[in-house]
Image (cartoon, rainbow, N blue to C red):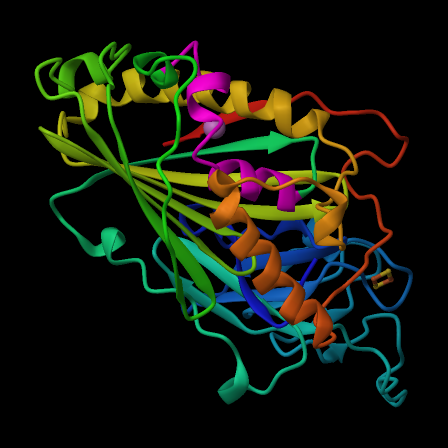
Amino acid sequence: MLKNFWYACEFSSAVISKPKQIQMLGERFALYRNPQGRVVALKDQCPHRGAALSLGWVEDGCLRCPYHAWKFEADGTCSHIPANQPSVPIPRRARVDAYAVQEKYGFVWIFYGDLPEAARPPIPALPEFDDPGLHPIYYETKVNAHYTRTLENAIDFAHISVVHTGTFGNGFDREQTIEEYDVSEEAWGGNANILFQQYTKPKGFLKYVVRPSSSQVRAKISFYLPNINKLEVSFASGRLINFGTHIPIDEKTTLIKRVQFRSFLTTPMADPLFYRTNAKVSREDSVVAESEYPYAIPHNLADEVHVPSDALSLAYRKMRHRYLAMGWGIDSQNQLAHPNGHSIESSLTLIN
Ligand code: FES
Ligand code: CO
């Protein structure tokens, strides 16, 4: 896991005045929206007895602990301890970590790291989110796999015709060769363009947009450190863009929050069709991602075998290694999602 990046950790619409716990990077965060509409993010662990502040309540824009009602300001300082006599000072160590927050592209982003504001990598530019011609749907999937595996799965060209035979991959021949492609590096990320030939057997909603007469499908896949993927698919009659933030809950669990945009069938009445297909696609991907071992991608490139169609994931691995070598790695042993070692079922939740 990497520090010193902005992490899109929750849909903006899901953060309200009632505090909520977010699990990410082996840590727990308490998020709430203050009366001015600004999102506040604090470490979700009271310095008094460790209670989860997210079970408390918001008062005057501050967060009250659910256990002894200590009051924490948005900057994490404690300003009131009800059990103290008025003459007793508040201990200096009575404070919680507060995190920088931005709201952008319908997400709440938390900065996790120790860089001063001016040195922080920016949130990537994602112009689709401001394009009124695109219709979005929002959904999320929990996967029992390391986020490096789920991210790589999302930027992998060669699995589509193999893994997604039950959905959109069925339009290809099973043994689809991938043309050689170049990777373009951009700030904090990389991308590649591919032209898929012979997409001749469209299935599901693709029947409505890919004409058998024009069987070429153009795809652009991008990644942005630390955990974002974007897939843009262009057919003869429209564009489909899949965006995902692969939130590392802990070393074995990932919550993928996704937005899918489409330029065709933009009526919300068509949303259930896309939710259904995406749920199936997510299940197809989860099965392979959850089987991968070791859980995280290996530190040593030579520990796995690479072929030309892996060029984009190799670029991701190499770029990630550069930041690990700079000391930006965090190795969290906290197992938040399944502390008793039980595996969790992959699940998909639709966000309306
Ligand atoms: Fe939070 Fe006591 S545990 S006030
Ligand atoms: Co896939």
Closer to us: 44 or 306:
306
Q: Relative to residue 124, is residue 241 drawn left or right?
A: left
Which quadrant, please, contains the N terminus?
Answer: bottom right
Closer to us: 90 or 30:
30
Closer to us: 234 or 84:
234
Residue at 73%, 58% (x, y): give it: 44
Q: Judge whether 140 appears above or below 4 on screen.
A: above
Q: Position of residue 48 (x, y in %)?
A: 89, 67
Q: Judge whether 132 appears above or below 35 on screen.
A: above
Q: Position of residue 80 (x, y in %)?
A: 75, 77
Residue at 76%, 45% (x, y): give it: 303
Q: Where is residue 199 in the image (x, y as percent from the top left)?
A: 25, 19
Q: Relative to residue 75, is residue 194 drawn left or right?
A: left
Asked if residue 140 shows in the view, the reply is yes
Where on the picture, by quarter, is residue 351?
top left
Which quadrant, please, contains the C terminus?
Answer: top left
Residue at 49%, 88% (x, y): give it: 118
